Image (cartoon, rainbow, N blue to C red):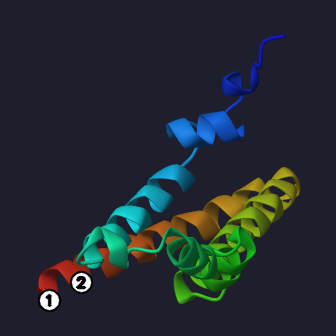
Amino acid sequence: MQDFAYLFSDSAAAWLEGRGDARFLRYERHYRAARSAAQSQEAFDLEQSNNRFAQRFGSGRLQFAAVSKSKAFGALATFLILLWGGSALLSSVGATQPVAVAAVLGVVFIGLRMRHLRARGQQ
């Protein structure tokens, strides 16, 4: 019976061949760096290297937690929530009062343009 595991991007065979995602490349970089740091072949310990790799790159949850605490992620999340809420609000209010929404959008766009031109003139 043939083993078709190599066809799946998340299989161990695909991971060892470097296909599917960046986990293999990350491990390969770590392995080569640890190997070059060891002065001789006898000084390199693969088991210790693998333990250091596991501690450094543990699980994706820790990386997501670190990313979610960053200021850039917070700003992006806030922007996307406000964009979604604003588009929902504009569509619902725009259906009942299109002239008022058009006037507000016109004032906002003109204000943004003036702000851009002032910032450009001060440079």
Residue positioned most to the front:
42
Q: Nearer the viewer, residue 28 or 118?
A: 28
Give the image location of residue 13, x and y in percent: 64, 35
Q: Nearer the viewer, residue 18 or 94?
A: 18
The residue that appears at 67% across and 26% down in the rendered structure is: 6
Question: Toward which corner of the image does residue 80 lie, by quadrant?
Answer: bottom right
Q: Around disc 1, counting alpha carbons within 10 Å, would you say few (fewer than 14), some (14 to 19), or many (20 or more)? A: few
Give the image location of residue 48, x and y in percent: 54, 79
Total numbered badges shown on the rendered structure: 2
Q: Does the image show residue 120?
A: yes
The residue that appears at 53% across and 64% down in the rendered structure is: 106
Q: Secondary structure at mark 1?
A: helix
Rendered view: 44 above or below 55: above
In the picture, measured across the screen, residue 87 lies left or right of residue 48, that is right
Quadrant location, the N terminus? top right
Quadrant location, the C terminus? bottom left
User: Label 1 sits on what residue type?
Assistant: Gln
| Disc 2: which residue | 118
Give the image location of residue 119, x and y in percent: 24, 84
| Disc 1: which residue | 122
User: Label 2 sits on what residue type?
Assistant: Arg
The residue that appears at 74% across and 74% down in the rendered structure is: 61
Q: Secondary structure at mark 2?
A: helix
Q: Does the image show residue 114?
A: no
Q: Nearer the viewer, residue 35 or 4?
A: 35
Give the image location of residue 17, x and y in percent: 52, 36
Q: Nearer the viewer, residue 93 or 69?
A: 69
